[in-house]
């Protein structure tokens, strides 16, 4: 017997299809002085559905953009165009705003303090998958929690003192 689709009802016990929970878009500040790398990171972050702020090439640009946009995540290089430190820039940013931090650097050994860090570090050269995974982790609820943000601020402060 063929019934019109309007007359057919799914049984109450039929499982409902699961909808994928969509993560809300966050602002991500990119601090990177190499334009090709900055553009690559921008595309990766945008593909994940987040808004990109920047890129900032210097310490001053980074601080200015961060104070205007108040990003949830900061992706930073360690060495910046004006010879300044991305670590110091991030430390100053974290004194003003709460954000998760990802360092993308050719010198990851500079970011080792001997303790478990809530700061994500991606060595250059990096893969798209590494950046995607780090951004996904940094934008997670856990990474955005006050406890993790405070631990991140403490870790970046230790890195700044180590320099």
Image (cartoon, rainbow, N blue to C red):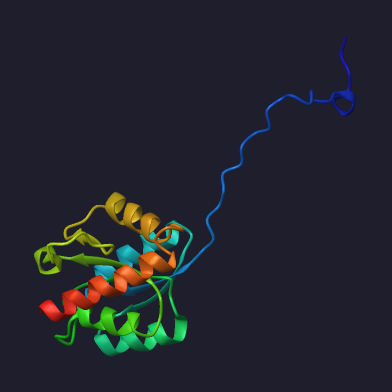
Return the residue found at the far top.
1
Residue 13 appears left or right of 151: right
- How many numbered tags mark residues here? 0
**Residue 145 sits above or below residue 64 on the image:** above
Query: To which quarter of the image does residue 33 belong?
Result: bottom left
- The residue under the point 30% across, 69% down is 152
**Residue 44 sits above or below residue 75 on the image:** above
Q: Position of residue 39 (x, y in %)?
A: 32, 68
- The residue under the point 22% across, 73% down is 34
- The residue under the point 18% across, 75% down is 158
Task: Using the rendered image of the protein, determine whether residue 74 is visible from the camera's viewpoint.
Answer: no
Query: To which quarter of the image does residue 92 belong?
Result: bottom left
| Quarter placement of the C terminus | bottom left
- The residue under the point 72% across, 25% down is 14
**Residue 69 sits above or below residue 138 on the image:** below
Task: Using the rendered image of the protein, determine whether residue 88 is visible from the camera's viewpoint.
Answer: yes
**Residue 93 sits above or below residue 102 on the image:** below
């Amino acid at each position: 017997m063929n019934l019109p689709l309007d007359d057919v009802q799914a049984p109450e016990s039929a499982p409902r299809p699961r909808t994928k929970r969509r993560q809300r878009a966050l602002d991500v500040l990119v601090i990177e002085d190499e334009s090709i790398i900055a553009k690559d990171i921008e595309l990766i972050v945008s593909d994940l559905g987040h808004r990109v702020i920047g890129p900032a090439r210097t310490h001053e640009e980074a601080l200015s953009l961060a104070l205007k946009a108040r990003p949830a995540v900061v992706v930073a290089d360690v060495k910046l165009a004006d010879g300044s430190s991305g670590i110091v820039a991030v430390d100053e940013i974290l004194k003003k705003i709460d954000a998760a931090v990802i360092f993308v650097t050719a010198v990851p050994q500079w970011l080792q303090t001997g303790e478990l860090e809530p700061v994500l570090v991606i060595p250059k050269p990096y893969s798209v998958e590494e950046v995607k995974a780090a951004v996904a982790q940094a934008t997670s609820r856990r990474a955005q929690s006050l406890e993790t943000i405070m631990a991140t601020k403490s870790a970046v402060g230790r890195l700044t003192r180590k320099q």
